[in-house]
Image (cartoon, grey):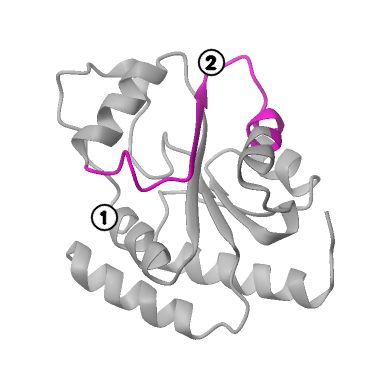
């Protein structure tokens, strides 16, 4: 499925929901791309999971901001890959820093930078510990097993709408 087809399908999924997050945050490694940055070279041409780019562009088209929260010992490689993929300017916040930090620090910085409350955010990550920690902050968080895809987007938006209906404030 090409990026345009995924984007169209993601737009349809987004159209099913009356309440959308103000910000969708993605981890990088094994969430939008199928590798760890520290195992790659800046000279390589990276690839994304098949649905990632279409989903990101559909969110932007619907007026939903997107951001990155990623721990990496090689943030320079991650940033170089985003540039090569034409995604460097699409994110309102890019929190990519060393592996000893916690995802909660990324989200504190994203909240300060954007002014968006945690309960208005949706987060995708491939590590349960991050899902748990960020969920405890009030962010709707979705575990992805094999990269972000249309099914994960639908699950995330459904959970977000359910949380919003419950009136959680953070």
Whether residue 34 appears in magenta in the rendering, the answer is: no
Q: How many marks?
A: 2
Locate residue 110 relative to residue 30 in the image: left or right. Answer: right
Question: Residue 145: image x %, image y %?
Answer: 48, 49
Residue 83, disc: none
Mark 2 secondary-structure assignment:
loop
**For the magenta stretch, what is the residue range?**
86-108
In the image, residue 163 sits, relative to residue 102, either above or below, namely below
Q: Which mark is residue 50?
A: 1
* Residue beneath the point at 79% across and 45% down: 137
Q: Position of residue 57 (x, y in %)?
A: 33, 61
- Label 2 with label 1: CB-CB less than 8 Å: no
- Is label 2 or label 1 in front? 2
Residue at the disc numbered 2: 98
Residue 109, picture quadrant: top right
Q: Residue at x 47, y 77 (%)?
A: 14
Distance CA(mark 2)–CA(mark 1):
27 Å
Q: Residues within 10 Å of mark 2 (few under 14, many from 20)?
A: few
Q: Position of residue 113 (x, y in %)?
A: 62, 39
Q: Earlier in the sequence, mark 2 or mark 1?
A: 1
Q: Is residue 155 left or right of residue 32?
A: right
Circle 1 sits in a helix, a strand or a loop, which is it? loop
Residue located 52% across and 42% down the image: 126
Residue at 68% over, 43% down: 111
CA neighbours of label 1 inside 10 A, class few (<14), some (14 to 19), many (20+)? some
- Is 69 on the left-hand or right-hand side of 3? right
- Taking 142 as reference, is 29 above or below it? above
Q: Is residue 105 magenta?
A: yes
40 sits to left or right of 22:
left
The N terminus sits in image quarter: bottom left
| Percent coordinates x, y for residue 49 in the rendering | 30, 49
Up-down relation of residue 70 to residue 59 (above or below) = above
């Amino acid at each position: 499925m090409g990026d345009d087809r995924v984007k169209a399908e993601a737009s349809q999924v987004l159209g099913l929901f009356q309440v959308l997050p103000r910000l969708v945050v993605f981890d990088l490694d094994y969430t939008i791309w199928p590798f760890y940055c520290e195992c790659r070279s800046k000279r390589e041409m990276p690839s994304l999971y098949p649905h990632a780019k279409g989903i990101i562009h559909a969110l932007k088209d619907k007026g939903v901001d997107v951001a990155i929260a990623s721990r990496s010992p090689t943030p320079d490689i991650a940033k170089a890959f985003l540039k090569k993929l034409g995604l460097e300017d699409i994110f309102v916040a890019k929190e990519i820093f060393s592996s000893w930090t916690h995802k909660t620090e990324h989200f504190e910085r994203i909240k300060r930078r954007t002014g968006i409350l945690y309960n208005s955010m949706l987060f995708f990550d491939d590590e349960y510990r991050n899902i748990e920690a960020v969920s405890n902050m009030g962010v709707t968080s979705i575990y992805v097993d094999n990269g972000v895809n249309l099914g994960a987007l639908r699950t995330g938006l459904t959970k977000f709408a359910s949380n919003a209906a419950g009136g959680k404030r953070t």
